[in-house]
Structures are given as structure tokens and as C-alpha cells.
């Protein structure tokens, strides 16, 4: 073909092509009612054109006769007219490359304006060409595949969510079941241990403090529930007795609380009398003998702290055997069989408190003694005197010696020695024996040696006015008083003679 076609022919040919293209474009718009955006159609068409490698049948018309008669003398620029008769459908492969065409499958390509672009093999299809159905389906599949790979599988996510939800349900149910079981167990004492636990309740403790102590000693499991339950049952309005208690989880929360308000008892009661001068050991043995309380539990309870004023004034002394020896006031009491140990001990202490009047305290202050020191003196008087008449005389001897420590540093009483050897457990007595020996230790012993009655207490507060520093008893209980050691030695000789005669008389 010739390459020297006049420039005017080129312009005419371009005009013809533009007119034809405009007519063809209108026809495409009428037949294609698709809602595809023109810009999307161009992009999709461009992608398909790049991927399409399949050749199509072409009919080439390159005759000059097609040019109008009035233009035959002008040599036209050659162009190629393509007619797309069919599009081959190949399955399981990429869509075939094909140029975009109008609805009649007719389009122009390979038109070269000049030499610089003469080697191009193809051009993009005109804009506005709609996609074939197969091509659109392929493109849709490609986009769906990209979307599916970019987000997780809905079915997999659903299974995970279901498993997590199920696990939460199981854990919550287990936790609630456990809480419910422990709450019922605390309230009704279901499947609880029979093991006895010793607890100490301080004086003036409220219901919250009591619940805390029970929880700390593993007598209850759910403290929050027990606190709410206690308040619901109006235990917050009660006053709890301080002291030691022996409780078991099988008693249940309410049973334990009620035991601290009133003494647990049976219908059986017993009246017991305790003579003046009884020691704690003798009192506990009698209570145990008549099934009021067990002695070993009483020993543990008596070591508790109490809120009595007289108790607070007792000085701590490691050499003292029992802090409350001397305050278990001797009297006649009514007890319930199987009573609580704390309740029983408080009966004795309440009685003492009622007997120790402000008048007695004022008298002790005047003498320069504490309540505890008066009870120690009274306990020695109780053990040394053979009868009430002798008490004030013996009291005068003790006071005279205590008031003259330079002349009489010790009070020299046999009863204090006997207390350690006779009224303490054997292994304990060996520990305290030296401390209660008033022949080798100055002044009063560390604590009372028995529980004195009112006569001995009054004698300790109001001794006989005398100058006696010695006394001694014979076997019949007669007392011999002396102001000097010489007189006392003579009294000792008289005592030995009377005792010998008494024994001989009884032997015959």
C-alpha cells in the first residue's frame, strides 16, 4: 500500500469514521439497557481485552470502490473492518480475549494515522460496549473469590462463637451450683464435719465479727451469705456472750449463733453447791462429775479474756497459774446438764462481780491494795483459818507482816506451798511450786490459792487490830497467836504436845 496519501483524504476519512462511530454508538445505547456505569464498562472491557488471546475470524475489505464516487480520484488511507461473528466459549479456562464491539459485532481496528503507530496489532474497543454475559459471569466469580479470601468463613466463626457461649454457660452454672451448695450447707449443716473447733469470741462482738471468726476457723464457707442470713434472722439485734466456745460445722450457722446468745441446755437441770475455799480444780471436777461440763473444756475456757472491771485490773504475771483462780465465787448454783462452758464460768464471775461492791473497793484503796491483792490475802485466810472467828486474827498477822517487810520479808504460810503440790496437775505444780512458796519469796504469792467466800474477803478488808506476827494451829484446830518469835516457838512446843496426846487418845 502507498504511504503518500494526501492529508486531505485523511481528514475526510476521519470524518466518515467519526460519523459512523456516532451512529453505531446510538444503536448500542438503545439496545443495551444495562445499568452498568460507563466508566466501569471501560475498565472491565480493558481487563478482558488484556486477558483475551483468542483470535477471531476477520473479513478484510480494502477496496477503493467503497469510497464515494466524488472521492475516487483521492487515494484513501487504508483501514480494516472487523466483523465478530462468534465468540468461542472455552470452559475451565480464562475468558478469551476479544475486542469490544457493538450489537452487530462490527468494529474498526488497526487504523493507523501515521507511521509511528503502524506496528500496533490491536486497539481498545470503543467505549460504551457492553460485556457479554459469560464475561460478566467470569468477572463476578473473580470478585467473589477475592471477597471470600479477604473475610473469615461465616460458618467457622459461628461454630467458635457457639463453643465459647457453651463454655461460659457451663462455667457459670458450675459456679452458681457451688455457691448454692455451700450456702445451703452453711445454713442447714448438710454433709458437714463433726470435728470440734475451739473459738474465742471477744466481749461486745457484733454479728459481723462473729461471722468472720466462724469463717476464719472453717466453720462456715460462704461468709457473705452467712452475714446476710444472720442479719435477715435478726441476729444483728442480739448480744453475743464473749468467751471460748466449742463448735462443730454440723451445728449449722444458726445453731452456733444461738449457742453464743443463750446457753445450750437440755431439759435436765441440777443444783450444785461449792464450799468456800474450793479451788478451780475442785470446782471443775465437780462440774464434770455431774455432767454439766467437761473439765478439759472448762480449763480452756477459763483462760479467755473477759470484760469485767476486776478482770481488767489483774496484772499479767507469767508466774501465776490461773488468772481467774479466786474469782469463781463459791455458792449454790442451778445448772443445765450439758451447758456451755463459757456460760457456766460466767455464772461464777457474775456472782463475784455482784458481791464486790464499791464499798469494798473503796476500803481496798484505803488500805493501799488492789482488788486482786485483797482476794489473794482472802484466799490465804480462807485456807489458814479453821473457822470464821479466826479469820480476822489471821488477817491481822498477814497485814502486820506485809506492812513491815524489813522485819518480816516473807509471810511464811504453809497453805501456799500446798496449793502447788495438791491443787495443780502434777506436771504443772512442779513449774509453779517455787513461785507460790511464801517461805522463800517476798510478799504475796502471784495469785489467789483458792476461791474465798465473803467472810474471808471481809476479814481481808477489815483485819483485827493487833500486834501479832505469828500463829499456829494444833490438830484440833485451835489457834495460838504470838507477837514475837520466842512466843511462837513456845506455841509450837505446845502444839506438838497437844497433837501427840490427841493421837495417843485416838489410838487407844
Image (cartoon, grey):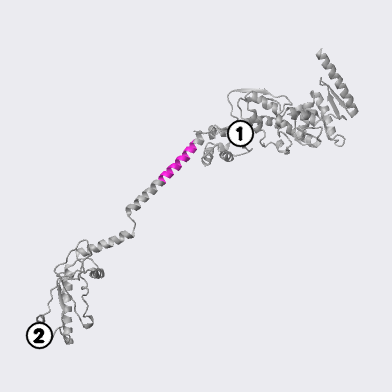
Q: Residues within 10 Å of mark 2 (few under 14, many from 20)?
A: few
- Which residue is under mark 2? 70
In the rendered image, the residue lying farthest to the right is: 486
Q: Nearer the viewer, residue 475 or 331?
A: 475
Which x, y percent locates residue 391?
Answer: 80, 26
Task: Give how far apart the Cα atoms at labels 1 and 2 are.
Answer: 133 Å
Which x, y percent locates residue 297?
Answer: 63, 31
Which x, y percent locates residue 112?
Answer: 20, 80
* Residue at x 87% of width, y 35% of height: 407
When the figure is inspected, residue 105 is found, relative to residue 492, above or below; the finding is below
**Residue 356 found in image quarter:** top right
- Which residue is under mark 1? 245
**Residue 506 found in image quarter:** top right
Region in magenta: 168-184
Instruction: Report if residue 326 is visible in the image.
Output: no
Magenta span dominant secondary structure: helix
Disc with the residue nearer the chain's start (1 vs 2): 2
Instruction: Report if residue 86 is visible in the image.
Output: yes
Q: Nearer the viewer, residue 427 or 30?
A: 427
Which x, y percent locates residue 276?
Answer: 73, 25
* Residue at x 80% of width, y 25% of height: 385
Residue 183 located within the stretch drawn in magenta: yes
Amino acid at each position: 500500500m502507498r504511504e503518500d496519501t494526501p492529508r486531505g483524504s485523511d481528514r475526510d476519512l476521519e470524518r466518515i469514521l467519526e460519523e459512523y462511530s456516532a451512529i453505531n454508538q446510538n444503536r448500542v445505547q438503545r439496545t443495551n439497557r444495562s445499568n452498568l456505569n460507563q466508566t466501569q464498562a471501560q475498565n472491565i472491557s480493558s481487563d478482558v481485552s488484556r486477558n483475551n488471546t483468542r483470535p477471531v475470524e476477520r473479513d478484510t475489505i480494502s477496496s477503493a470502490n467503497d469510497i464515494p464516487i466524488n472521492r475516487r480520484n483521492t487515494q484513501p488511507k487504508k483501514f480494516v473492518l472487523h466483523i465478530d461473528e462468534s465468540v468461542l466459549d472455552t470452559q475451565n479456562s480464562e475468558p478469551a480475549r476479544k475486542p469490544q464491539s457493538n450489537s452487530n459485532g462490527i468494529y474498526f481496528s488497526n487504523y493507523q494515522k501515521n507511521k509511528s503507530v503502524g506496528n500496533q496489532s490491536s486497539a481498545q474497543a470503543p467505549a460504551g460496549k457492553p460485556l457479554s454475559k459469560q464475561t460478566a459471569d467470569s468477572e463476578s466469580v473473580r470478585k467473589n473469590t477475592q471477597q471470600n479470601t479477604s473475610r473469615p468463613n461465616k460458618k467457622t466463626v459461628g461454630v467458635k462463637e457457639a463453643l465459647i457461649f457453651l463454655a461460659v454457660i457451663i462455667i457459670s452454672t458450675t459456679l452458681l451450683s457451688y455457691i448454692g451448695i455451700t450456702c445451703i450447707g452453711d445454713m442447714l449443716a448438710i454433709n458437714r464435719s463433726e470435728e470440734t473447733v475451739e473459738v474465742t469470741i471477744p466481749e461486745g462482738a457484733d454479728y459481723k465479727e462473729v461471722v468472720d471468726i466462724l469463717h476464719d476457723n472453717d466453720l462456715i464457707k460462704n461468709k457473705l451469705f452467712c452475714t446476710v442470713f444472720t442479719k435477715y434472722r435478726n441476729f444483728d439485734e442480739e448480744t453475743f456472750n464473749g468467751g471460748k466456745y466449742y463448735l462443730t460445722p454440723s451445728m449449722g450457722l444458726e445453731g452456733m449463733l444461738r449457742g453464743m446468745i443463750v446457753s445450750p441446755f437440755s431439759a435436765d437441770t441440777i443444783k450444785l453447791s461449792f464450799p468456800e475455799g474450793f479451788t478451780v480444780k475442785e470446782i471443775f471436777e465437780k462440774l464434770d462429775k455431774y455432767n454439766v461440763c467437761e473439765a478439759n473444756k472448762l480449763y480452756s475456757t477459763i483462760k479467755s479474756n473477759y470484760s469485767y472491771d476486776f478482770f481488767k485490773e489483774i496484772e499479767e504475771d507469767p508466774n501465776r497459774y490461773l488468772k481467774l483462780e479466786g474469782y469463781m465465787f463459791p455458792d449454790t448454783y442451778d445448772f443445765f446438764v450439758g451447758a456451755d462452758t463459757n456460760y457456766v464460768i460466767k455464772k461464777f464471775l457474775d456472782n463475784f462481780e455482784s458481791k464486790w461492791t464499791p464499798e469494798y473497793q473503796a476500803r481496798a484503796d484505803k488500805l493501799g491494795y488492789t482488788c486482786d491483792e485483797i482476794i489473794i490475802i482472802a484466799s490465804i485466810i480462807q485456807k489458814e483459818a479453821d473457822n470464821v472467828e479466826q479469820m480476822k486474827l489471821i488477817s491481822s498477822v498477814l497485814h502486820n507482816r506485809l506492812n513491815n517487810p524489813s522485819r518480816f520479808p516473807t509471810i511464811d504460810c504453809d497453805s501456799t506451798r500446798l496449793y502447788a503440790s495438791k491443787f495443780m496437775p502434777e506436771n504443772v505444780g512442779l513449774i509453779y511450786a517455787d513461785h507460790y512458796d511464801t517461805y522463800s519469796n517476798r510478799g504475796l504469792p502471784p495469785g489467789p490459792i483458792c476461791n474465798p467466800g465473803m467472810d474471808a474477803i471481809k476479814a481481808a478488808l477489815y483485819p483485827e487490830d493487833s500486834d501479832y506476827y505469828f500463829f499456829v494451829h494444833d490438830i484440833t484446830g485451835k489457834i495460838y497467836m504470838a507477837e514475837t518469835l520466842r512466843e511462837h516457838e513456845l506455841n509450837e512446843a505446845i502444839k506438838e504436845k497437844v497433837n501427840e496426846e490427841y493421837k495417843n487418845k485416838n489410838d487407844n
